């Protein structure tokens, strides 16, 4: 079994983004990402910190706007409106989840689609659906890059995606379809999940259950993309796939950590550079 090196690929993707930023900066254009964090959720703080670090690495300016947990929906919408109109800002990202009293859907819909570097607004989702140019959601886009970089042909292959969330499972299925794979989407109501998964040449696990995918669910030689990030009872981070059980089954696998998570972060940099170029009439 070969491990797909997400760390190396993410570093390469970020270097390419940094090269593009250097060209933009020569023209006095400075890409900028604004990240809004509402409340004190420790995991969200870590994620936001990671995004700021990636921006620094790519020479992208970043602005983390930390708002208190009691921020009202109206206040948050006003903040987004300010960023929508701020010409120095090219990407806007609202870190999810938001506190329970705020309607996430209304907040996402308020982001200018031209600055929607997460690819979550209905306009970008719709464009992705019909195959138009858009901001692709970072996690599934990163998965596609990982599969591609591993030298795996997607065309004509059987791909199975476990999970149908709006941010991972559904767009993942769509992007695999775009690559001409034959795609099956599984979810919590799927019957005989293991048998369906065993059909897959490419298996993507986006379930949110610690080491859920075992040997019985993987076809020999399959490519396994593990999207899950779960804190195990041992306090360590684990994927949705039990990598240790697959050593003599899977052909290639993305590790957790060191796989999809890093590529998700790298794709945000790609989208931010793209937004900056488009807003400046350069792409
Ligand atoms: P979610 O909870 O929104 O969706 C989980 C999906 O799994 C659902 O569609 C559900 O139908 C399916 N599911 C649940 N139990 C199942 C079962 N027993 N059998 C088959 N399907 C089942 O989660 P999400 O936001 O899509 O995230 C999934 C995982 O990916 C989580 O671990 C999350 O932390 C991780 N994640 C990682 C990244 C990254 O950058 N690596 C980004 C987003 C999410």
Image (tube, helix red, strand yellow):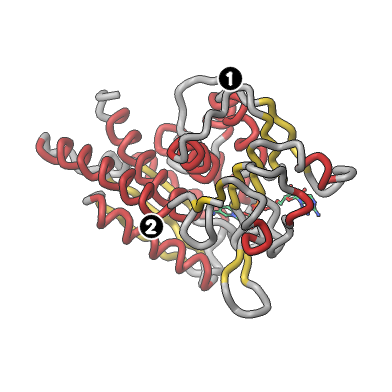
At numbered mark 1, what does the secondary structure look like: helix, strand or loop?
helix
Q: Residue at x 52, y 34 (%)?
A: 152
How dense is the environment of label 1, judged by Cα within 10 Å: few (below 14), some, or many (20 and up)? Answer: few
Q: Residue at x 66, y 36 (%)?
A: 201
Q: Quadrant of residue 256?
A: bottom right
Q: Residue at x 55, y 27 (%)?
A: 128
Q: Position of residue 187 (x, y in %)?
A: 79, 45
Checking the image for residue 154, the label placed there is: none
Compared with residue 277, is residue 267 higher up or lower down, i.e. above or below? below
Q: Position of residue 86 (x, y in %)?
A: 31, 42
At numbered mark 2, what does the secondary structure look like: helix, strand or loop?
helix
Compared with residue 166, is residue 54 higher up or lower down, i.e. above or below? below
User: Residue 111, can we see it?
Assistant: no
Sequence-wise, the earlier of marks 2 and 1 is 2
Look at the numbered discs 2 and 1 and tell me whether their residues touch, using CB distance below 8 Å: no
Q: CA distance from mark 2 to mark 1?
A: 29 Å
In this view of the protein, which residue sits in the foreground, 194 or 266?
194
208 left or right, relative to 216:
left
Tell me if the residue at label 1 has its CB under 8 Å from ligand 1.
no
Compared with residue 193, is residue 56 higher up or lower down, i.e. above or below? below
Q: Report which residue position mark 2 lands on.
A: 51
Checking the image for residue 130, the label placed there is: 1
User: Residue 276, can we see it?
Assistant: yes
Q: Position of residue 174 (x, y in %)?
A: 62, 30
Q: Position of residue 169 (x, y in %)?
A: 66, 42
Tell me if the residue at label 2 has its CB under 8 Å from ligand 1.
no
In this view of the protein, which residue sits in the foreground, 39 or 242?
242
How dense is the environment of label 2, judged by Cα within 10 Å: few (below 14), some, or many (20 and up)? Answer: many
């Amino acid at each position: 079994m070969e491990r797909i090196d997400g760390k190396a690929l993410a570093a390469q993707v970020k270097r390419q983004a940094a090269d593009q930023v250097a060209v933009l900066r020569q023209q006095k254009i400075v890409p900028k990402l604004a990240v809004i964090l509402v409340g004190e959720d420790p995991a969200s703080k870590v994620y936001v910190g990671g995004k700021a670090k990636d921006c620094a690495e790519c020479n992208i300016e970043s602005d983390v706007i930390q708002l208190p947990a009691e921020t009202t929906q109206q206040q948050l919408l006003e903040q987004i409106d300010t960023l929508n109109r701020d010409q120095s800002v090219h990407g806007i990202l609202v870190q999810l989840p938001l506190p329970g009293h705020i309607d996430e859907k209304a907040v996402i819909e308020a982001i200018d689609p031209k600055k929607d570097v997460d690819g979550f607004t209905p306009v970008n989702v719709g464009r992705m659906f019909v195959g138009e140019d858009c901001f692709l959601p970072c996690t599934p886009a990163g998965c596609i890059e990982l599969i591609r970089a591993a030298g795996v042909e997607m065309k004509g292959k059987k791909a199975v995606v476990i999970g149908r969330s709006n941010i991972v499972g559904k767009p993942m299925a769509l992007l695999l379809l775009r690559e001409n794979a034959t795609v099956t989407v599984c979810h919590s109501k799927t019957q005989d999940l293991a048998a369906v998964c065993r059909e897959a040449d490419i298996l993507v696990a986006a379930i949110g259950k610690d080491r859920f995918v075992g040997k019985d669910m993987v076809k020999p030689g399959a490519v396994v993309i593990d999207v899950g990030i779960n804190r195990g009872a041992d306090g360590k981070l684990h994927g949705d796939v039990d990598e240790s059980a697959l050593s003599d089954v899977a052909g290639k696998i993305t590790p957790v950590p060191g796989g999809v998570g890093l590529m998700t972060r790298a794709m945000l940099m790609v989208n931010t550079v793209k937004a900056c170029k488009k807003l400046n009439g350069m792409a």
